[in-house]
Image (tube, grey):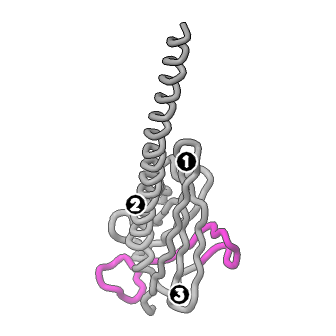
């Protein structure tokens, strides 16, 4: 009987040690995957803001005079509006050739883009499990600086990644 109890205690100790050793790499792997996933999603969102969802109507094509940042001087931007001349070659304004774009943070969709004319409906830039932690836009002459932070949860922990990117807007 004593041998059985000693063997049981030893087995439990060995099993606990093995599980602890195996759980550490699993947690480290989960953290690495969560951070990699956020980095990947930030790159995709950055390119969609700069170049648009379908390769046009992005911030890079905006004219300097059309950029409007709301609410302006706060740390959490509600939206950024800009107009794009919808021609392959920028021309003087013609009737109905401008497209108004808005990048906006909303509670329901998170970060989304809306273009008018076009569908006019917001298109989400994020997957459902990813949230916007920070969306800051500042303008200094021709340079627009965007600070974007995304977060997600995995295994009871919240992971956040942030990226800053600058856009130099063309002259009007």
Per the image, the residue denoted by label 1 is 153
Residue 110 visible in rendering: no
Q: Give x and y (percent) for residue 92.
A: 39, 89
Q: Which secondary structure class fits the magenta region best? A: loop
Q: Secondary structure at mark 1?
A: strand
Disc number placed over residue 108 in the picture, else none: none
Nearer the N terminus, badge 1 or badge 3? 3
Disc number placed over residue 65 in the picture, else none: 3
Is residue 88 rendered magenta in the image? yes
Q: Give x and y (percent) for residue 131.
A: 56, 54
| Crowding near the residue tagged with mark 1, few <14, some 14–19, many ≥20 C-alpha atoms within 10 Å | some
Whether residues under marks 1 and 2 lie with C-beta atoms below 8 angstroms apart, the answer is: no
| Measured Cα–Cα span from mark 1 to mark 3 | 40 Å
Q: What range is drawn magenta here?
A: 69-94
Q: Between residues 17 and 39, which one lies in front from this camera angle?
A: 17
| Measured Cα–Cα span from mark 1 to mark 2 | 15 Å
Per the image, the residue denoted by label 2 is 40
- Residue furthest front in the image: 2
Q: Secondary structure at mark 2?
A: helix
Q: Secondary structure at mark 3?
A: helix
Q: Residue at x 46, y 82 (%)?
A: 167
Is the residue 51 above or below the residue 14 in the image?
A: below
Q: Between residues 98 and 58, which one lies in front from this camera angle?
A: 58
Residue 38 visible in rendering: yes
| Measured Cα–Cα span from mark 3 to mark 2 | 32 Å
């Amino acid at each position: 009987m004593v041998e059985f109890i000693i063997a049981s205690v030893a087995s439990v100790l060995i099993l606990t040690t093995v599980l602890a050793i195996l759980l550490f790499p699993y947690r480290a792997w989960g953290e690495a995957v969560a951070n990699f996933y956020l980095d990947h999603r930030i790159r995709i969102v950055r390119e969609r803001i700069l170049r648009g969802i379908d390769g046009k109507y992005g911030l890079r094509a905006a004219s300097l005079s059309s950029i409007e940042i709301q609410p302006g001087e706060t740390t959490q931007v509600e939206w950024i509006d800009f107009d794009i001349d919808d021609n392959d070659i920028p021309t003087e304004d013609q009737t109905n050739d401008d497209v108004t774009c808005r990048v906006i943070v909303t509670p329901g969709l998170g970060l989304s883009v809306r273009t008018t004319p076009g569908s006019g409906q917001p298109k989400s830039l994020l997957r459902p499990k990813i949230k916007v932690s920070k969306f800051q836009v500042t303008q200094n002459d021709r340079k627009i600086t965007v600070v974007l932070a995304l977060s997600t949860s995995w295994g009871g922990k919240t992971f956040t990644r942030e990226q800053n990117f600058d856009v130099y807007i063309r002259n009007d």
